[in-house]
Image (cartoon, rainbow, N blue to C red):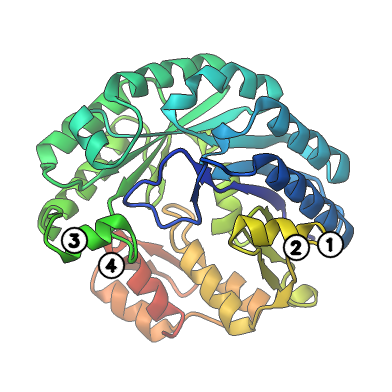
Amino acid sequence: MSPRLGLYLHWPYCVRICPYCDFNVYKAANADGEALFAAMLDDLRAWADRAEPRPLASLHFGGGTPSLMTPAQVAAVIEMADRLFGFEPGAEIGLEANPKEAVRFAGLAGAGVERLSLGVQAFDDASLKALGRDHDAGEGLAAIEAALSAFERVSIDLIYAREGQTPQAWGDELGRALGMGLKHLSLYQLTIEPGTAFDKKLRRGALVPPEDEAAAEMYEITAERTAAAGCPAYEISNHAASRADQSVHNRLYWEGEDWIGIGPGAHSRWGRADQGGRKGASAAARPADYIARAGSDGAQDLEPLSAEDEAAERILMGLRLVEDGLDAARVRQITGQGVDEAAAARFAAQGLLEWDGRIARLTGAGRLYADRIANALAGG
């Protein structure tokens, strides 16, 4: 049986670059959006020629700020994806948006988007300014209401462990979000990524994040209050009221299914070790390079992944799922590589992992060290 297939489109342009962001993004001013859009359609056609025909389980527009695309462009991508691949019944078509683009929501819904992921990030003006956002708290709240009216499914992003934030303040903010009728929340602890503007501020002492103990307390508050509100974590940072409310597209990543990524810097994963080998691809990061390449022979070359690399990816991603956990036996069946059972037993003894010899699940305490544990299980 072939893996399920998702399609990701990366629109790299933003009105402004947030100081915490380490994604492949560029300022929208003077960007040649039409040339990039044409290149993306060329890239999608190239993928249809090289890929095993399968209906799409999901189509996700990410970025960057894909809500800067016109509804006509979004509709054209959906139409071409349907013509080249088709969609599974009830396939998820999602798009990431900023509150400033709320005026576009009706048009995007009319184009075929059924799930909106809204980058609210905070509910107070001081925090939004510090995060470099271009909306204020009032615009964020209004955008949530507009999204709930326009789309079948809505998720919002919030960032916690911000500079100056206390556990009590985060609890109040989270409670406000939980009272809005949302069935999906993506709640991220602020991470200072190398090379970002926040990283530079941190190095010169101009940014002071909360202490580790306070950040850990905020994580515990997140887990406890979302569960009590009927919107528990199903992945380390993602919370949903039911399985039907979970992100189909993200689950494809976490479960090791196939996906095609188009757009500058997009990644793709294709195939399995037991079906001739898994391959990966990365598109050119700079829009100009991507445009030049997509117009000729397709923007990406597939390269085989080693069994070790594939196993490490599956362990890193699968371990993030809260209830399902990581099926180590399936990883071995697909890749021929297993988890480090001694490491699994050690983490289990420390109360960081549930391990029965087949399924590995992070405990609440273990989720704070997810990447370190995954690396150890992969033999790193």
Q: Write the residue at 74% across / 77% down.
A: 277
Decide which of 23, 118 is in the foreground and name it: 23
Q: Is residue 16 above or below residue 4?
A: above
Single out the mark in the foreground, 3 or 2: 2
Q: Mark 1 or mark 4, which has the lower sequence index?
A: 1
- Judging by the rendered image, the residue that carries numbered circle 4 is 352
Tell me where residue 258 sits by quadrant: bottom right
Q: Mark 3 or mark 4, which has the lower sequence index?
A: 3
- Judging by the rendered image, the residue that carries numbered circle 2 is 293
Q: Residues within 10 Å of mark 4 (few under 14, many from 20)?
A: many
Residue 359 drawn at (x, y percent): 48, 67
- Judging by the rendered image, the residue that carries numbered circle 1 is 296
How many numbered tags mark residues here? Answer: 4
Please give left or right for residue 176 compared with residue 334 in the image: left
> Mark 1 and 2 residues: CB-CB less than 8 Å, in contact?
yes
Spatial CA distance of label 1 from label 2 is 6 Å
**Quadrant location of the N terminus?**
bottom right
Residue type, numbered disc 1: Ser
Q: Secondary structure at mark 1?
A: loop
Residue type, numbered disc 3: Leu
Residue type, numbered disc 4: Leu
Residue 84 drawn at (x, y percent): 86, 45
Q: Mark 3 or mark 2, which has the lower sequence index?
A: 3
Residue type, numbered disc 2: Arg
Residue 79 visible here: yes
> Mark 3 and 2 residues: CB-CB less than 8 Å, in contact?
no
Single out the mark in the foreground, 2 or 4: 2
Q: Secondary structure at mark 4?
A: loop
Spatial CA distance of label 1 from label 4 is 50 Å
Q: Mark 2 or mark 4, which has the lower sequence index?
A: 2
Please give left or right for residue 103 compared with residue 174 in the image: right
